[in-house]
Image: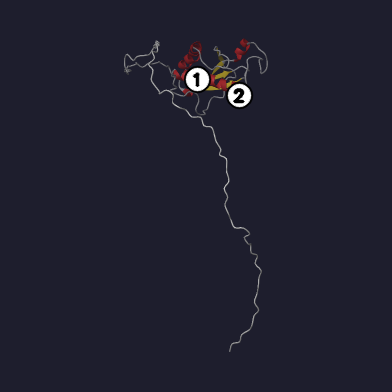
Amino acid sequence: MFHYRESQALFREIPVAKVANNASTSSKRIDGNYTLITKQVEVSPAQTIQEDIPAKVKTIERRVLVKDETTRKATIPAEYKEIKKKILLKKGGMSAWREVPCSIPERGEILPINYSLGSDVLTVRSKKIIDEYVYDLLEKNPNIIVEIGSHTDAQGSDAFNLNLSERRAKNVVEYLISKGVDDTRLIAVGYGETKLMNDCTNGKDCADNIHAQNRRTEFKVF
């Protein structure tokens, strides 16, 4: 079943612009704007004019290849220089402990050989003296044993002098071995500065000839 209900109308005000006058056109004079433009005008056509220019001469030096570069093979002989080299063939000195007599003399016989300061080198003269004093003695007495004892002066440290004296004694022994003496018959001992011949001890100012007395080698026979 349906029924109807009455509703009131709704109104809203809308503003409306009204044309007062109709659109129209009118004519108006506008003055023109002018700009001055510069224009190039050909007066005479382009043309070529022949003109004589005097020649300029300059001397130029240059290198000219006369002969091509080549490689030449040349044989250069070798150059040789003779060098003398000393080689130890047999080590001298004692390499092991062995029994020796207890009756070793306190002081041995002095070999009249002297050394330069700090040197252990045997000179030609020193070797001749060793031959005369020790080598001949060993050759004539095949059963004896000889101790070579070397001494230094008090110049330098104790350790340095001990090492130096050992090298000096060893050089004498090695020289005798090189002459054919059996190494079991030789003993090398370095005493350093422990057995000085005079009172030129550490720190004492002495002449070199006095110090030289302590730079000596002795030999003891037993």
Residue that appears at 52% across and 21% down: 170
Q: Observer-nearest residue: 171 or 185?
A: 171
Q: Which residue is mark 2?
A: 159
- Nearest-to-viewer mark from 1 and 2: 2
Sequence-first tag of 1 and 2: 2
Residue that appears at 55% across and 22% down: 166
Q: Observer-nearest residue: 78 or 3?
A: 3
Mark 1 Cα shell of 10 Å, populated few (<14), some (14-19), many (≥20): many
Label 1 and label 2: CA atoms lie apart by: 21 Å
Q: Position of residue 136 (x, y in %)?
A: 47, 14
**In the drawing, what numbered circle is on residue 150?**
none
**Image quadrant of residue 7?**
bottom right
Q: Position of residue 61 (x, y in %)?
A: 39, 12
Q: Residue furthest bottom?
A: 1
On the picture, is 15 further left or further right than 49?
right
**Image quadrant of residue 82?**
top left
Q: Position of residue 114 (x, y in %)?
A: 56, 13
**In the drawing, what numbered circle is on residue 173?**
1
Q: Which quarter of the rendered picture does the N terminus lie within?
A: bottom right
Q: Say which amino acid is labelled 1.
A: Val
Q: Inspect this view and state whether residue 222 appears.
A: no
Marks 1 and 2 in Cβ contact (< 8 Å): no
Q: Say which amino acid is labelled 2.
A: Ala
Mark 2 Cα shell of 10 Å, populated few (<14), some (14-19), many (≥20): few
Q: Position of residue 126 (x, y in %)?
A: 51, 12
Q: Inspect this view and state whether residue 158 appears.
A: yes
- Which colour scheme appears in the figure? secondary structure
Q: Observer-nearest residue: 147 or 159?
A: 159
* SS label for mark 2: helix
* SS label for mark 1: helix
